[in-house]
Image (cartoon, helix red, strand yellow):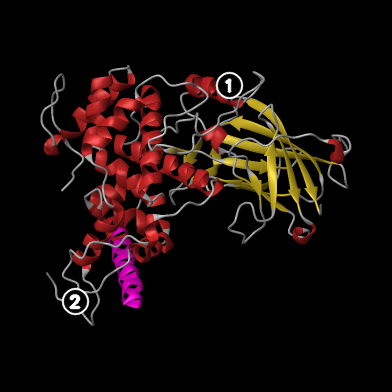
Amino acid sequence: MTPPEHGEPNDDEIDTLVRDALGEIDEQRFITLVARAVQPVDTSERPAASPGAARTRRWTGSGSIPGQLLAAAAVIVVVAVGFGALASRNTNGGIATETAGPVSTTTTAAGPGAPVATVPGSTAVDEVANCERNETGRNFTCRVPAAARGEQVVELFDDESLTEDVVVEPGRSACVEVVDPDGLTVVGGDCTGAGLSITAPASGTYTIQYEVRSCEIGSDGNADRQNCDAATSVVEGEILVLLGV
Amino acid sequence: MYVITTATVGPVAGSSGGGRADDEDLARRAGAGDEAAFTELARRHRRLLDAACATACPNREDREDALQQALVDIWKGLGGFSGDAKLTTWMFRVAQNAARRQVRRSLRSVPTTSDRDVERASPSSEWGDAVVTRSTLLDALAALPEDHRDALLLHTQAGMPLQEIAELKIAAVGTVKAWIHRARRDLALALEDER
């Protein structure tokens, strides 16, 4: 083993420290996880490895939406990619005029693990405002306080509802993107699973169009958004954004 | 050392040939619903899947949840695996995606007391008598550029040869070596600061 220089650990020691810090799953435990994976599970829940671990909620409610539909799409097209297109129909100076009515009367119900809104640089997802998912599972209300006005960015940790039902084909990657109402301009998106960020120019109702697509992986290892298949299905939801409340 | 061939495991019933061909055979059978084949395939690539989840999810409990979901995704997805890409590349990506989703789920949940603040890496190295906090190392790992972290963990955790890491990451072997070197250097600097 190479002696440490200037007191620094050498390569072998670094590797050992990393292995010690991360640990490794026991083979017997792993086999247990494998056995669980092949068991039929309730479509509303996934198996959780740890006792008490949070279970992921899939889209539920009316049959018009995501979970089951996307699962079916994933089977049919083999591959898939969650593509979230968000077309704005703002009530306050937005691109279009279609509205959802008085925002103050909208009723929502938060569910477990509801997505939240935040502003750039914020690490606490509940710090700025909450987005609540209504009972249909596809509509949300996001309240962004006045202090955040000007940032006007809503970050939704929600694309997993799509990608969890989707297995990405080799050589391809999953993306969620946000486009303008005409579907021409990408105003936000994510291919890493880190979360979906959009710019909300004003309070109002935004329509989310989830499309199932697949994209090539570019030379940098990330999804090449210029090389994606056509959408195979589209479903819609809505986000009511309330800025400056 | 973990190598993604049958050299590291015993022969598999119903398979023939060596290494990669066996993996593909297992994948085909698993894709058709053969649970035994899936179990063998998963067991064979346990360290790869664990490392893939660790790249995004170093916390052990979250990582186990991520691993569970990765196994579900792979089981469900093998039927559609076309074989255009290397099986291990596909499995790595599926597992890493599962881990990233797990990280996001954790962000939503209420923080709980973590072992990261109290657990310390075992003083198994010859690196002096310094006590290195596990949290320092995990933080330093998390701060590494993604490619550097992926390469280091695939090499150290999964024991993957540089050539295979290069194929998986779509990069030159020299680049992978540089990533690992820089990752180790950055970790060493972080640990030195800790002392």
Q: Is residue B186 magenta?
A: yes
Out of A90 and A17, give the one closest to the viewer: A17
Q: Is residue A217 visible?
A: no
Q: Is residue A197 left or right of residue B97?
A: right
* Residue A21 visible in the shown view: yes
Query: Residue A124: which quarter of the image?
Result: bottom right
Crowding at label 1, few (<14), some or many (≥20) Cα neighbours within 10 Å? some
The disc at residue A69 is 1
Q: Quadrant of the N terminus of chain A?
A: bottom left
Callout 1: helix, strand or loop?
helix
Q: Which mark is residue B119?
A: none
| Chain letter of the residue beneath label 2 in the structure image | A
> In the rendering, at what x and y percent does residue A61 appear?
65, 22
Give the amino acid at mark 2: Pro
Q: Which residues are magenta?
A: B176-195
Q: Is residue B169 above or below residue B12?
A: below
Relative to A232, A223 lies left or right: left
Q: Which residue is mark 2?
A: A4
Q: Is residue A152 left or right of residue B136?
A: right
> Where in the figure is residue B190, as x and y percent of width and height?
35, 72
- Say whether residue A225 is magenta: no
- The kind of residue tagged 1 is Leu
Name the N-terminal-most of marks 1 and 2. 2
